[in-house]
Image (cartoon, helix red, strand yellow):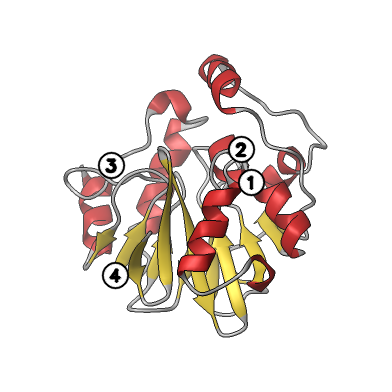
């Protein structure tokens, strides 16, 4: 587990990251990793001197299984509220079936599929919401209801989800095969480049610490 900012920890779960944020009244999780891997979250909580009961909110960037995989189990054991964008909420709750493409159907055979989980707060607009210090930014493209979260800490910490990924040059685009709408994804990346943040963390790839927004500006301009 890597501390990427003050009280912000990156949790590696095979090829994807979840993030643990220590706040004044407990813990906020941003995404939950692959199905059947909640023990990795428990381990990270212990390393941060926290327990499952300290988790009061789970922020989901989008419905993909490698980000929502443990949400239902963690919700059952902690009572945490689930926050997601309204557009993706129907898939996360199981009201609508997982809209898997061919590659995702193949991957699901290996990784499993997430259990449905209720969404307590369905985000419909950008800006502050119920969790103090966090701002929601709708970043459609990877999924229609993808949302990134900006934390007001250490110059700004951007939880990018899969709106972008970490790469050798700092930031790269998410692979087209896993992106529902490439044009929307490019527009979302340009929007993020206009935000204010110093640190960016990703569902996939290495965090960027220091002047992270500049890397987004460079990629958006390329």
Residue 26 visible within the image: yes
Question: If you read the primary sequence from the N terminus, does the residue marked by circle 3 or circle 2 appear first?
Answer: 2
Secondary structure type for disc 4: loop
Q: CA distance from mark 4 to mark 3?
A: 17 Å
Q: Which mark is residue 198?
A: 4
Image position of 88 (left or right of 1): right
Q: CA distance from mark 1 to mark 3?
A: 26 Å
Secondary structure type for disc 1: loop
Q: CA distance from mark 3 to mark 2?
A: 26 Å
Q: Which residue is situated farthest in the bottom direction here?
A: 24
Question: If you read the primary sequence from the N terminus, does the residue marked by circle 4 or circle 1 appear first?
Answer: 1
| Residue at 78% over, 60% down | 120
Residue 85 lies, with reference to residue 80, above or below; the image says above
Q: CA distance from mark 1 to mark 2?
A: 5 Å
For label 4, count other residues whose C-alpha is less than 10 Å away and answer few (under 14), some (14-19) or many (20+): some
Q: Which mark is residue 196?
A: none
Q: Which mark is residue 70?
A: 1
Q: Which mark is residue 35?
A: 2
User: Where is residue 106 shown, x and y percent of the image?
Assistant: 55, 15
| Residue at 53% over, 21% down | 107
Viewer-nearest of discs 4 and 1: 1
| Residue at 59% over, 23% down | 108
For label 2, count other residues whose C-alpha is less than 10 Å away and answer few (under 14), some (14-19) or many (20+): many
């Amino acid at each position: 587990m890597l501390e990427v900012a003050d009280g912000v920890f990156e949790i590696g779960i095979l090829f994807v990251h979840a993030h643990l944020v220590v706040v004044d009244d407990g813990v906020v999780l941003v995404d939950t990793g692959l199905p059947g891997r909640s023990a990795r979250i428990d381990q990270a909580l212990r390393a941060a001197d926290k327990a499952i009961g300290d988790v009061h909110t789970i922020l989901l960037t989008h419905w993909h299984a490698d980000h929502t995989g443990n949400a239902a189990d963690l919700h059952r054991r902690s009572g945490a509220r689930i926050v997601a964008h309204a557009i993706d909420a129907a898939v996360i709750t199981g009201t609508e079936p997982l809209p898997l493409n061919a590659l995702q159907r193949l991957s699901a055979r290996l990784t499993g599929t997430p259990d449905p989980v209720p969404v307590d707060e369905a985000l419909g607009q950008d800006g502050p919401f119920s969790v103090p210090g966090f701002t929601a930014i709708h970043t459609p493209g990877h999924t229609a209801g993808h949302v990134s979260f900006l934390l007001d800490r250490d110059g700004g910490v951007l939880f990018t989800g899969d709106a972008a990924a970490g790469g050798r040059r700092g930031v790269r685009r998410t692979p087209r095969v896993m992106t529902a709408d490439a044009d929307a994804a490019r527009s979302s990346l340009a929007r993020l480049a206009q935000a204010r943040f110093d640190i960016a963390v990703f569902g996939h790839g290495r965090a960027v610490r220091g002047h992270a927004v500049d890397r987004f500006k460079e990629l958006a301009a390329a």
